[in-house]
Amino acid sequence: MRWRTRAVGAAVLVAGAALAVLPAGAAAAHPLGNFTVNRYDGLVVARGELRVDHVEDLAEIPAAQARSRIDRNGDKEMSPAELSGWAGERCRDAARDSRLTGSAARRAHRRRGPRRAARRARGGRAAP
């Protein structure tokens, strides 16, 4: 029984040393790749209201490409006003071909601008 305890102890020691010495694999910067743009449109139904929440998640490369379009004054900073303007453009582009049909279409339809556009708008993300 004593040799079994020593064998298990040695195995644990060797495994622990191997884990400490072997390099870890590279962490992925973005779950679906560095070139992706993920979109989500969620319907929010409330009393007297039907709202579409449009969210875009830009990976590193599309986010870097979008910086020049967001930073309108070229000061290398993305202000809340610039982020809100860009988010509004993206929402309008996403809603351009949207249609509301059925009994709800008879009611007045109005489009609202982006809400909380600057919220969590860091690290290449904009959350309108």
Image: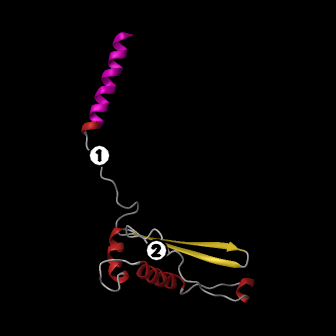
Above or below — where is 23 with respect to 2? below
Q: Which of 59 and 120 lies nearest the eye of the viewer?
A: 120
Q: Residues within 10 Å of mark 2 (few under 14, many from 20)?
A: many
Amino acid type, residue under disc 1 in the picture: Ala
Residue contact at pointers 2 and 1, CB within 8 angstroms: no
Residue range corresponding to the magenta coloring: 1-19
Q: Secondary structure at mark 2?
A: loop
Provide the residue designation for mark 1: 24
Q: Position of residue 33 (x, y in %)?
A: 36, 64
In percent of the image, x 40 and y 60: which residue is there?
Answer: 31
Provide the residue designation for mark 2: 118
> In which quadrant is the N terminus drawn?
top left
Q: Is residue 4 found left or right of 93 in the rendered image? A: left
In percent of the image, x 72 and y 87: which residue is there?
Answer: 107
Q: Residues under labels 2 and 1: Cα distance? A: 35 Å
Specify the quadrant of the image occupied by residue 65: bottom left
Amino acid type, residue under disc 2 in the picture: Ala
Above or below — where is 74 with respect to 123? below
